[in-house]
Image (cartoon, rainbow, N blue to C red):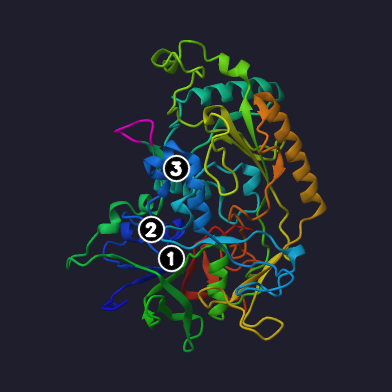
Amino acid sequence: MNGLDSNYEVFIAGSEPLGATYARQILEYHKSARVLMVEVGAQESPVIGMNLKNAVKYQRDLDAFSHIIRAAVQPMSIPPASGFIPSFKAMDQDPTLSIVNRVTQTVGGMATHWTYCCLDPHDDELVQCPIERSTMRKHLQRGRELMNVPADQFETSARRELVKKALTDAYKPRGIAVGSLPLAGERSEDKDTLVEWSGMDTILGDFIHSKDADGQNRFKLLSECLVVKFETDPDPPGKIKSALVRDLRTGKEKYIECKVFVAACGTICTHQLRWNSGIRHKALGHYLTGHSNGFCQVVLRKTLIDQLGSNNQNAKTDPADDIPILLNDLEPQIGILYSPSHPHHTQFHRDAFSYVTVGSQIDRRVVLDIRYFCMLEVQESNHISFFTQDRFGCPNTDIYGMPQPTFHFEATAKDDELAQRMMREMCEAANVLGSYLLSTPPHFIPRGIHGHTTATTRVGNDPNTSAADKNSRVRTPAGDTVYEKLWIGCAGCIPMQ
């Protein structure tokens, strides 16, 4: 932070995609505004916030990317085990009420390793949205433009057509639609078997280098700097005065004043920052939710693969290859779409994840990932709490000295019933396509492992049940007003009435 000038209008805590969206909108539509973004993590690529999966190595070998994901995610609260207790264990965490809780603290956030699937919500999923339906659809379209979600980029994939046809034949008679997964990224112009996946850099675009009339950079990123708290102005109340920032390398701290402040640190850390700032509306941290997730891998049925026939280009160029699929065939990206009769989000594809790899046990071209997701009931009692000390009086902090979260989550009987239905339907779909890979039969993924927990900072019209209004302006602890200069932007902003 040495030599940092103070002439910034907008302060953004966090560099995840929604923080980047705030920056992009401000830089694009306010031509003189200057934006300061502060990120606790490091910049891990030469391009600010680039998706690390764009490296050719990882596109040619998806499994090799799994260790990148494992290294990127950091647990926030681990229930204590018996015996020796190392540092940063959450002594007050009840293991029966915990979920897997991990965050990505790096420049770009989850966008450095995430494949964005940008489906349009079904109307049934927007029933309680406080934003008018047509306006919400326009916002979603703008989001797709910023994330660069083009038309289908995978139409040349032989496996895509194979999987889509098999599923369509099975589900069309039941009135269930099969379609392509809209992904944020596009095929490389230089080599169309490579994909340029979107990241924070995609959202910011050329505005990351924009300058004002005096030749000053309008965007500044401080990495490896922690936003400790927001300071409120006692006169008048309800106004944010500054942000306290700590340089993690030097330990030096500085108060930074701006006209506008945005907290965009993700579901857990946005709540953490607000709590540490004394901004504690009664809904903050409550209504914690996510989804149930079933997963398996199948080996495509030989009768399906044989349908590709000898006309496939790979069969012509390499007669010794028994599999008529190009070595660099784009991955299939297919889904059975959500509907009231099929209340699941589904993905039939191949991707890198922290919890599974195919390895060398079988040719990866014939392996398909199948993932099913279903929603959970939203309950006020499911929440995240923070305390500065645990029950033994010891400091209760994370690795950066911030208050450590404790999770309180319990699924309902309805949640379990829907999850079991989801598992049955996933197995039915898997049987259409092939047989299970022995190492990954159908099973449930622990809740929270994806980092998809949400709703702790949700927006809404009811000041009693939402931590921010429908315009993402943060409510004061009393809930009767909003802070004059503070907005939030994270995956936890779920519109609810």
Marks 2 & 3, CB-CB < 8 Å contact = no
Q: Residues within 10 Å of mark 1 (few under 14, many from 20)?
A: many
Asked if residue 149 can be seen in this view, the reply is no
What amino acid does circle 3 point to?
Ala
Residue range highlighted in magenta: 188-194
Marks 1,3: beta carbons within 8 A: no
What separation in Å lies between label 1 and label 2 (alpha carbons)?
A: 9 Å
Q: Which mark is nearer the camera, 1 or 3?
A: 1
* N-term mark: 1 or 3: 1
Q: In the current view of this chain or complex, which residue is farthest to the top?
A: 310
Q: Name the residue beneath numbered marker 3.
A: 184
Q: Is residue 16 magenta?
A: no
Quarter of the image with the N terminus is: bottom left
For image coordinates 65% across by 49% down, the residue present is 127
Residue displayed at 71% across by 42% down: 443
- Residue 278: % across, % down: 56, 81
User: Observer-nearest residue: 21 or 77?
Assistant: 77
Rounded to the nearest whole Å, what is the CA distance between mark 1 and mark 3? 23 Å
Quarter holding the C terminus is bottom right
Relative to 485, say whether 455 is above or below.
above
Give the residue pinned by disc 1. 41
Which residue is drawn at the image coordinates 76% and 56% (left, top)? Answer: 411
Secondary structure found at label 1: loop
**Amino acid bearing label 2:** Glu
* Residue 193 part of the magenta-drawn span: yes
Viewer-nearest of discs 2 and 3: 2
Crowding near the residue tagged with mark 3, few <14, some 14–19, many ≥20 C-alpha atoms within 10 Å: many
Depth check: give the residue in front, 152 or 434.
Answer: 434
> Mark 2 sits on what residue?
44
Residue 491 in the image: state x and y as whole percent.
Answer: 54, 57
The reply to whether callout 1 and callout 2 are in contact (CB within 8 Å) is yes
In the image, 83: left or right of 494? Answer: right
